[in-house]
């Protein structure tokens, strides 16, 4: 429930996140509780090898969001909501939410995880240095988060 699916995730993103756990910049409560200790002893070569390994496993979508919100979520994902200053996610995460380099795959992640991540930036928790996500996520209200997390959980 609380841990993200890592199969098929972008290797550069995975390496960045492990580094963010190690330097404690990814600082939400679950990261502190579970991940800071888990990665503390990894050397850079093992971090790289793990990232390559996770990325090589074919991903399976979680399919656990609310199916009646797929259409609304997809529209926000593709176009954003310009009048509410909500960015198009597609612009960075790609047409099929597949990500690229240090921008993560979102397609198929679990609803609960996506929702928590999008809420946490608004609550002031951080991730990798210089990421645009705190600004992007702060513009999202509860209804948009609900729709985006639902839609993305079904993307394969
Ligand atoms: C300007 C580029 C950009 C835009 C626009 C953008 N993102 Fe992101 N997103 C990123 C980057 C870069 C990261 C990686 C952050 C990090 O390294 O900590 C990220 C990370 C994420 C994550 C974390 C995934 C995980 O595995 O923990 C989620 C969820 C997310 N974005 C959702 C969205 C949604 C939803 C939108 C549209 C409302 C969006 N993003 C728009 C660049 C962007």
Image (spheres, helix red, strand yellow):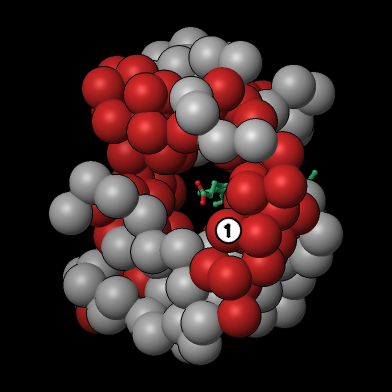
In depth, the one of 6 and 95 nearer the eye is 6
Q: Quadrant of residue 96?
A: bottom right
Which residue is painted at 38% across and 64% down in the image?
Answer: 5
Which residue is painted at 28% across and 31% down in the image?
Answer: 34
In depth, the one of 142 and 113 nearer the eye is 113
Estimate how packed mark 1 is, as few (under 14), some (14 to 19) or many (20 or more) residues with alpha carbons within 10 Å: some
Which residue is painted at 66% across and 60% down in the image?
Answer: 49
Q: Which residue is mark 1?
A: 50
Place of residue 65 in the rendered image (x, y in percent of width and height, measured from the top left): 24, 69
Position of residue 135 relative to residue 70, above or below, is: above
Residue 155 visible in the shown view = no
Residue 101 visible in the shown view = yes
Place of residue 25 in the rendered image (x, y in percent of width and height, measured from the top left): 58, 16
Give the left or right position of residue 121, taking residue 98 as reference: left
Give the left or right position of residue 22, taking residue 73 as reference: right
Place of residue 6 in the rendered image (x, y in percent of width and height, measured from the top left): 46, 63
Position of residue 155 relative to residue 142, above or below, is: below
Disc 1, SS: helix
In depth, the one of 30 and 96 nearer the eye is 30
Place of residue 102 in the rendered image (x, y in percent of width and height, measured from the top left): 77, 51
Number of dots carrying numbers: 1
Q: Tell me the quarter of the image containing the N terminus.
A: bottom left
Position of residue 90 relative to residue 95, above or below, is: above
Position of residue 101 relative to residue 153, above or below, is: above
Give the left or right position of residue 130, taking residue 135 as reference: right
Q: Quadrant of residue 117?
A: top left
């Amino acid at each position: 429930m609380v841990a993200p699916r890592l199969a098929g995730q972008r290797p550069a993103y995975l390496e960045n996140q492990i580094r963010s756990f190690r330097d404690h910049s990814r600082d939400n409560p679950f990261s502190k509780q579970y991940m800071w200790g888990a990665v503390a002893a990894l050397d850079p070569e093992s971090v790289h090898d793990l990232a390559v390994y996770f990325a090589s496993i074919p991903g399976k979508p979680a399919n656990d969001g609310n199916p009646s919100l797929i259409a609304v979520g997809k529209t926000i994902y593709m176009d954003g909501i310009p009048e509410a200053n909500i960015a198009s996610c597609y612009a960075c995460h790609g047409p099929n939410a597949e990500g690229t380099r240090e921008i993560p795959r979102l397609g198929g992640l679990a609803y609960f995880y996506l929702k928590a991540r999008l809420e946490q930036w608004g609550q002031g928790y951080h991730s990798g240095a210089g990421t645009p996500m705190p600004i992007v996520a702060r513009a999202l209200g509860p209804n948009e988060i609900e729709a985006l997390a639902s839609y993305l959980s079904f993307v394969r």
